Image (cartoon, rainbow, N blue to C red):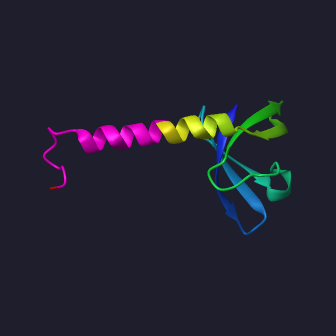
Amino acid sequence: MRGMLDRIEDGSNAVILLEENGREIIVPVSRLPEGSRMHSWFTITMNEGEIEAIEVDDNLAKAKAARAHNLMQRLRSNSGSRFKRR
């Protein structure tokens, strides 16, 4: 299962948005792997509804950032849009 660190609430709870089903899970900040930061992507291993492991997935984060960049470039270069900046 993959998810992204969306926010930290009250300095102690991390909210991770799960990619597969759009749900969010809340875990203690102390359970996050070292090097975690806002918008970090994780591979999460669950067993019977309980989190077994959370690992930072830097490759997925880079792929998601590249995809977002490419989409923005395509939107900006679309010459047929009536909403294009002048």
Viewer-proximal residue among 32 and 51: 32
Query: Does the magenta run of residues contain 16?
Result: no
Viewer-proximal residue among 14 and 69: 69
Task: Give the quadrant of residue 21.
Answer: top right
Name the spot of residue 1 as percent of width and height, x first.
70, 31
Extreme residue in the bottom direction: 10
Viewer-proximal residue among 65 and 53: 65
Name the spot of residue 55 as percent of width and height, x first.
79, 39
Viewer-proximal residue among 5 and 36: 36
Rendered residue at 66%/48% (across/down) = 40
Query: Does the magenta run of residues contain 79?
Result: yes
Left of 26 or right of it: where is 4? left
Which span of residues is magenta-colored? 67-85
Counting the numbered discs, the total is: 0
Left of 64 or right of it: where is 36? right
Q: Is residue 61 above or below residue 45?
A: below
Name the spot of residue 7 as percent of width and height, x first.
64, 58
Rendered residue at 82%/51% (across/down) = 34
Name the spot of residue 66 as percent of width and height, x first.
50, 38
Left of 6 or right of it: where is 44? right
Left of 2 or right of it: where is 35? right
Q: Is residue 35 above or below residue 67?
A: below
Task: Give the quadrant of residue 71.
Answer: top left
Rendered residue at 16%/39% (across/down) = 79
Locate the C terminus by quadrant.
Answer: bottom left
